[in-house]
Image (spheres, rainbow, N blue to C red):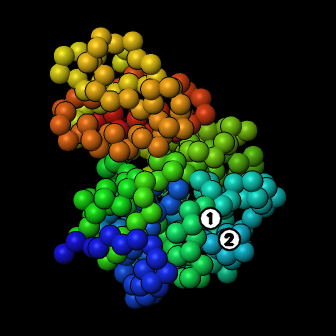
Amino acid sequence: MTAPIVPATDTAISRAVEILAGGGLVSMPTETVYGLACDAANPKAVAQLYAAKGRPIFNPLIAHVADQAMAAREGVFNTEALALAASGWPGPLTLVTPFAATGTVCDLARAGLPSIALRVPGHPIAHALLESFRRPLVAPSANPSGKISPTTAQHVASDMGDKLDLILDGGPCRIGVESTIVSCLQDPPVILRHGAFDASAYQTGAPNEEKPLAPGGMSRHYAPNATLRLNVTAPISGDAYLGFGPVDAPRGRVTANLSETGDLVEAAANLFAILRKLDRTWARIAVAPIPMSGLGLAINDRLARAAKRD
Ligand code: TXA
Ligand code: MG
């Protein structure tokens, strides 16, 4: 049976809280992507969530909380972490901190790590759900592990509708790429994943295949069925050409455009929906160059992993 998609009325939020309290799975919109949420303190629910996503259990989840007070029960915040939280929450920022002695998020959700990833989402529906539930919700993106993330309720329904109990509809996600992850386990903090929170004051954590800083950050991800080529200025016959900005290609050769005006914010918001659409009819997708600045870092990161073959 496919989970119903419901507008996030007060009644629907109460229903979602009941489902979560009973160990069920609910998809909630956030400003980045749709999440697949369950009670972070319930190992049985978390095990079901890993199974529903087909996610390896060594890849820990982000615990979503309503506010800094709830975050402070789960994580240990040093001065840097407090400053980052103050500037980025609520919003598209996830902070990795040491796990607090008072923390309630179960071991399985943290993949047994002594640290925890925490986020206060800015989306009103996610916020309302967290306020009503009053405990942390772990929520990975609501897609099968390794596939393209969902930015609409319909994406969630078509990818995993039969594996969850309820989908709260919040329309298309405003940002469209996952949160920036900053690890505060070292001084100074390091960026583990680029996103819409501007963390350019910090360095990107050195990739280390032996011991990845963000365990889910290394492998092929966001993967369409089509093969993807990046930084293509001259598409060849049989390619879907995904443009960015005013593309100088022969008429009719641009299949879709992330942003005709070259706006990176618009491009990020369109990215996953357009990839899904092209993937339905094309076997090869060639993507125009995207500048490596601002949100372009996050877009290029997602595209590079989507293009990876292993
Ligand atoms: O925007 C987002 O962050 C979305 C929405 C739903 O909130 N969530 C999301 O979750 O992208 P997910 O599970 O797809 O990505 C979580 C990332 C993974 O790469 C994981 O390895 C990393 O966070 N992570 C979780 N706990 C960690 C920890 N203790 N240390 C380092 N990385 C961690
Ligand atoms: Mg994901």
| Quarter-of-image position of residue 42 | bottom left
The answer to whether residue 36 is visible is: no
33 in relation to 41, above or below: above
Q: Which residue is mark 2?
A: 67
Q: Element type at marker 1?
A: loop
Q: Position of residue 10 (x, y in %)?
A: 49, 81
203 in relation to 234, above or below: below
| Quarter-of-image position of residue 205 | top right
Q: Residue at x 39, y 12 (%)?
A: 248
- The label shown at residue 120 is 1
Q: Residue at x 56, y 42 (%)?
A: 194
Say what amino acid the circle numbered 2 marks: Asp
Q: Element type at marker 2?
A: loop
- Give 188 or 169, whichever is nearer the viewer: 169
Q: Position of residue 180 (x, y in %)?
A: 58, 48
At label 2, counting other C-alpha atoms closer than 10 Å, the crowd grade (few under 14, some 14-19, many 20 or more) is some
Say what amino acid the circle numbered 1 marks: Val
Q: Residue at x 36, y 18 (%)?
A: 232
